[in-house]
Image (spheres, rainbow, N blue to C red):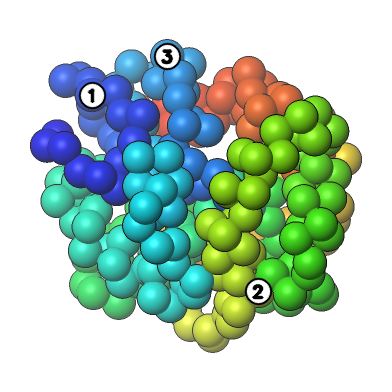
Amino acid sequence: MTANPWIGAYEARSSARLRLFCFPFAGGSASAYRGWSAALPPDVEVCPVQLPGREERFAEPAFRTIRELVPVLAERLDRLLDLPFAFYGHSMGALVAFELAHELRARGRAGPLALFPAAHQAPTVPLLDALSARTDAEVVAYVKRMSNRPELDEYPELLRLLLPTLRCDLSLCDTYVHERRSPLACPITVFGGREDEISCAELEAWRAETTGAFDVELLPDGHFFLTTSRGLLLQRLSCALDLLVS
């Protein structure tokens, strides 16, 4: 695969039979998926999506709406869809992955073999609070609570640098409006945290988004189980991916 600024922390695999595109949470970056390749099946190539406004793309303006972002993603990732692929999206990334699957279908392109939304309620469940409208202090407090990382207080300058991109990402979620369309046909496996604020009912509501197989996998810990329960998440994801490439 040739260099692509939209893919970060990438590890090529000559034996790849499937690509797993991983979409970041609000304020997150491709580095959240660093090291995933080593824990997943050898014929799966992990492609962490690097959005503008973070890490090596820090100077680029971040997108503020999914409607603007998704068509650009479809174009920038087009050359990488020459292998069968699947989507994993955490929190905000779940919405992005879901809408990209619909965008590809609207363009007449093959869609993902499977969709793995994580740590996000179904698209039909509205957000009750516009986080992007909160003060900086309130946004920082929310991030620390959801990530369970009070040590972030030790890096106030880093938080200040990340806030503009984080606010754009929160706006992207706050302005999202679900469009009624025919369900996807690919299997959907939803991952959720037992201690997350997102309820089981809100995770189960993803069932209406596909005519294919559906499952909910609950993991220990809260919203950021991709870090705190990383091993278990990758173990369960590996089982699901094995079925796709078998």
Identify the residue at image location x=43%, y=53%.
53
Where is residue 25 drawn, in percent x and y?
58, 49
Where is residue 134 drawn, in percent x and y?
78, 69
Determine which residue is flagged by label 1.
12
| Measured Cα–Cα span from mark 3 to mark 1 | 12 Å
| Measured Cα–Cα span from mark 2 to mark 1 | 35 Å
Circle 2 — which element? Answer: helix
Amino acid type, mark 2: Asp
Are the residues flagged by discs 3 and 2 in contact, CB closer than 8 Å?
no
Q: Is residue 133 left or right of residue 1?
A: right
Where is residue 151 drawn, in percent x and y?
80, 28
| Measured Cα–Cα span from mark 3 to mark 2 | 35 Å
Circle 1 — which element? Answer: loop
Amino acid type, mark 3: Ala
As drawn, 184 above or below 81? below
Where is residue 98 drawn, in percent x and y?
48, 62
Q: Earlier in the sequence, mark 2 or mark 1?
A: 1
As drawn, 94 above or below 146? below
Determine which residue is flagged by label 2.
174
Determine which residue is flagged by label 3.
38
